Amino acid sequence: MRNARALLLGVMLLLVADNASAARLGFVRASCLSEAISPWDAVSACTAVLQKFHRQTAVFLRRGAAFAELGAFDYAIGDFSRAIRLDPGDALAFQLRGLAYELAGRLAESLEDYRQAQALGRADPALAAAVARVTQALAPPPPPIIAAGEPPGPKPATAATLPAPEAPARAADGWLIGVCLLAGSAALAIRLARRREAAAA
């Protein structure tokens, strides 16, 4: 169904365009906005569109989403930021940039963007869940509960809580390791000599 819609949009853009290059660019824009193509293809198609038209908010959002799918969160954040500069009232752009910040581990910035998306009127259950998730992750851990009469701080070490000392390494262990390393390097030298002989023949 998505392929059919993208194809229909591409055909409509082809019919409306007044010259061949504009028609080609319209089809590239339609394929850029399609969710049926791979993230690599989306990045390529959206970049081609942005070379001609620099003020396409939807194209920046789609390319940012494709970058996020590829794990290139810094590029995704950059594209979402460009979309926000073009349309500061776009709550979806704030939500997507917040998600990219969250995936990149920048939780404070993520929470700021999520709250901005909510302030712009975006009522999305996923957004509310994201705000709760990031708020919980940013909350400091609760202080430890201390029992009455127990002194605060670490407990003194006893023989039962100390780890058992490791047995000292025997001289034979070091000898065995040396023999294994020597055998491995000898086997490698033999393989290399055989390769040289085969290459020379």
Image: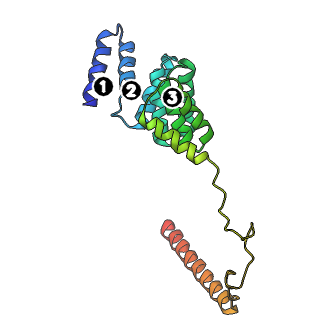
Residue at image coords 48%, 69%: 198
Q: Residue at x 30, y 20 (%)?
A: 9
The extreme front residue here reads 148
Left or right position of 32 against 83: left
Q: Is residue 47 visible?
A: no
For the residues bearing labels 3 and 2, Cβ distance under 8 angstroms: no
- The Cα atoms of the two marked residues, 3 and 2, are separated by 25 Å
Q: Amino acid at mark 2?
A: Leu
Three-letter residue code for mark 1: Ala
Q: For residue 45, what is the image quadrant?
A: top left
* Position in image of residue 112 (x %, y %): 59, 33
The percent position of residue 186, horizontal first and vertical second, equals 59, 80
Q: Position of residue 141 (x, y in %)?
A: 63, 54
Instruction: Tell which circle, 1 or 2, labels the residue nearer the N-terminal end.
Output: 1
Which quadrant would residue 73 be assigned to in this image? top right
* Image mark for residue 33: 2
Give yes or no for contact between labels 1 and 2 (Cβ–Cβ under 8 Å): yes
- Residue 197 at what x, y percent from top left? 51, 71
Quarter residue 46 falls in = top left
| 138, 147: nearer the viewer | 147
Q: Counting other residues with Cα less than 10 Å from the Cα at mark 2, is it few (<14), some (14-19), or many (20 or more)?
A: many
Q: Looking at the image, is 151 positioned above or below residue 103?
A: below
First along the sequence among labels 3 and 2: 2
User: Which numbered marker is on residue 118?
Assistant: 3
